[in-house]
Image (tube, helix red, strand yellow):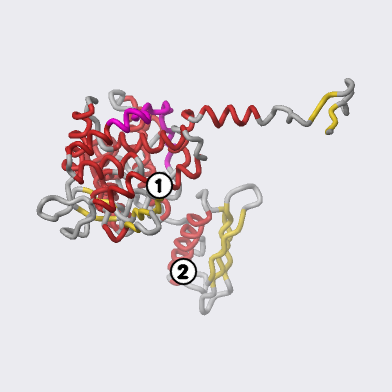
């Protein structure tokens, strides 16, 4: 008994089933699968094989029974609300998604997707349903609505992969997003914040400013940074973990990265190294700081420097912006910042006008070239 799947001559997939049942001639059944992917066609063929076996086993081989071949029974497709627990347990938790990602998905389904699609069968979600979902959330940012649609598409893809549905019920089109604006400190302003942090006389304050602005660490990565991640001999810092609501896990994107230490950051780490805790930033009790503590340490420097209060992520924007302004290639910035997509890095590249000028200047003729004549071969090298 075998099920073979091969491309159909007019598109799609052909399922070829060979059955050998005692007391009967060999049975061959070939049909075009009513599904679009090879894996779904394979599952469809296996279900058809099972029903063919059941049918011919219960049919009298002498000819007294009905020898017409059965149609594969249409399977019962669950609603989104019924399938969601399987998706959370069998996909999200089984793949050990970051706690922050898990929380984001669960809130997205609970607050938005379940009220909109919870009672709808997975195979009956239509393009109009998606449009109504977008229209009902016109008060949200485009990126927020697209995030909810991303979670819905992930669930439908897993349902198709597991054979719950044969194909995606509709194409999910995202809203067009404008390039997000971000704020950062220019070189002089950042130096003012560093000076204000030094004047506070608190190591945690200075290290927070420098790790954000000269290493690009996220707040969660600052919280999880340990002295074992610092190599002062080689002047490198290894980002291995992040902390979210007290839970330690991998960094965003699940990738560690190594960052060369800037001179001021290296000196500050060497000066303020301690044995109270394995963590670089720690409270007076030697415990790992919360996100609110990291924010307060930064706010103290911003107040002293006379700037408006902003979150630690502004320091990360500053780090990437300064690299771009100094002509650092986008790929290098991506690696240093730990961006999962180069698209995220490209937001900063407009700050590198010198790179564009250098590219245009490269089109100019070098000084050791001169023109002679007007023909196509008029430029000669001397």
Give the residue number, with chain letter if any, for mark 2.
53
Q: Residues within 10 Å of mark 2 (few under 14, many from 20)?
A: some
- Give the residue displayed 74% in from the left and 29% down from the top: 367
Residue at x-position 74% and y-position 28%: 365
**Residue 54 left/right relative to 200:** right
Check disc 1 and report the residue beneath it.
338
User: In which quadrant of the rendered image does the C terminus lie?
Assistant: top right
User: Which is nearer the eye, 340 or 230?
Assistant: 230
The residue most toward the bottom is 22
Residue 175: say if magenta. yes
Residue 27 rendering spot, x and y as whole percentages: 57, 69
Check residue 247 for magenta coloring. no
Residue 255, how many percent across, how many down? 39, 54
The residue sitting at 31% across, 53% down in the picture is 97
Relative depth, front residue between 300 and 6? 300
Q: Quadrant of residue 16?
A: bottom right
Q: Residues within 10 Å of mark 1 (few under 14, many from 20)?
A: many
| Residues drawn in magenta | 169-192
Mark 2 or mark 1: which is in front? 1
CA gap, disc 2 and disc 1? 54 Å
What mark, if any, has residue 50 been given in the picture? none
């Amino acid at each position: 008994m075998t099920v073979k799947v091969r491309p159909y001559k007019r598109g799609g997939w052909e399922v070829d089933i060979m059955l050998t049942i005692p007391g009967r001639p060999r049975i061959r059944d070939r049909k075009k699968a009513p599904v679009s992917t090879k894996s779904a066609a394979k599952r469809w063929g296996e279900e058809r094989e099972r029903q063919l076996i059941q049918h011919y086993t219960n049919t009298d081989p002498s000819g007294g029974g009905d020898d017409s071949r059965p149609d594969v029974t249409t399977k019962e497709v669950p609603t989104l609300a019924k399938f969601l627990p399987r998706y959370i347990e069998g996909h999200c938790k089984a793949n050990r998604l970051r706690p922050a990602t898990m929380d984001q998905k669960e809130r997205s389904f609970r607050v938005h997707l379940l009220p909109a699609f919870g009672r709808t069968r997975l195979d009956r979600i239509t393009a109009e349903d998606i449009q109504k979902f977008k229209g009902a959330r016109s008060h949200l940012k485009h990126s927020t609505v697209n995030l909810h649609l991303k979670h819905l598409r992930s669930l439908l893809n897993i349902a198709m992969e597991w054979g719950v549905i044969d194909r995606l019920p509709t194409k999910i089109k995202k809203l067009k997003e404008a390039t997000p604006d971000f704020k950062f400190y220019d070189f002089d302003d950042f130096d003012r914040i560093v000076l204000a942090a030094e004047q506070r006389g608190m190591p945690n304050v200075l290290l927070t400013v420098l790790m954000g602005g000269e290493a690009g660490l996220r707040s969660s990565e600052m919280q999880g940074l340990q002295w074992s991640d610092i190599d002062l001999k080689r002047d490198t810092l290894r980002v291995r973990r992040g902390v979210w609501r007290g839970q330690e896990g991998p960094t965003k994107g699940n990738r560690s990265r190594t960052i060369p230490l800037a001179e001021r950051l290296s000196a500050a780490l060497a000066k303020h190294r301690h044995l109270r805790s394995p963590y670089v930033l720690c409270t007076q009790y030697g415990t790992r700081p919360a996100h609110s503590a990291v924010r307060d340490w930064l706010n103290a420097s911003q107040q002293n420097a006379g700037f408006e209060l902003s979150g630690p992520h502004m320091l990360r924007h500053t780090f990437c912006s300064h690299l771009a302004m100094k002509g650092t290639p986008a790929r290098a910035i991506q690696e240093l910042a730990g961006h999962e997509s180069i698209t995220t890095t490209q937001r900063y590249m407009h700050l590198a006008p010198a790179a564009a000028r250098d590219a245009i200047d490269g089109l100019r003729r070098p000084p050791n070239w001169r023109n002679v004549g007007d023909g196509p071969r008029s430029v000669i090298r001397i």
